[in-house]
Image (spheres, rainbow, N blue to C red):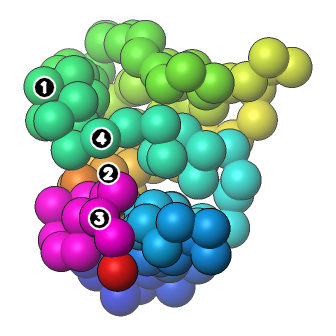
Amino acid sequence: MNQNIINLYKIEFINKISQYDQKITKIPNLKNDTFSAFLFDWNADEINKLLLPDIEEALSSATSEIENGSETISIILYQDKVDFYDDNGFTYQITTKDFKEIVIGWRDFLLTPPLNGNKV
């Protein structure tokens, strides 16, 4: 992932180890909690099948307005921006280009050992 994007959004992808059962949980930590929560709800397969195609469609069409979301956060994808919404309404906005790179980075992190749910 581009170092400028990492710095701009203060991105950390963390392998957290549960003290209780020693299992690994992969956690996204970004400067915006809404974006972090959004990423946390996605697995690599869902990103490939459901999210990346929508991002590509939005990037390729100036008139597209594509709705997507996770369990807790909804998004609207446009060619130039992504708007985030929670139960209280609009919370955050990011460029679609940066959003795509961060989503791909999260997907790649999820696929990198140690995998989610493995024991240490």
Q: Is residue 89 visible?
A: yes
Q: What is the number of the mark on residue 118?
A: 3
Three-letter amino acid code at disc 4? Answer: Asn
Image quadrant holding the C terminus, namely: bottom left
Three-letter amino acid code at disc 2? Answer: Val
Three-letter amino acid code at disc 3? Answer: Asn
Residue name at image x 43 percent, y 66 percent = 23
Residue carrying label 1: 49
Of pointers 1 and 3, the one earlier in the residue sequence: 1
Within 10 Å of the Cα at label 4, are there few (<14), some (14-19), or many (20+) other Cα atoms? some
Of pointers 4 and 3, the one earlier in the residue sequence: 4
Q: Position of residue 61 (x, y in %)?
A: 20, 20
Secondary structure that dominates the magenta span: loop
Of pointers 1 and 4, the one earlier in the residue sequence: 4
Within 10 Å of the Cα at label 2, are there few (<14), some (14-19), or many (20+) other Cα atoms? some
Read off the magenta span: 108-119
Residue carrying label 2: 103
Residue name at image x 73 percent, y 24 percent = 86
Spatial distance from mark 4 to mark 2, Cα to Cα?
Answer: 11 Å
Residue carrying label 4: 43
Image quadrant where residue 83 sits = top right
Residue most toward the front?
21
SS for callout 1: helix
Count of numbered badges drawn on the protein: 4
Three-letter amino acid code at disc 1? Answer: Lys
Spatial distance from mark 1 to mark 4, Cα to Cα?
Answer: 10 Å
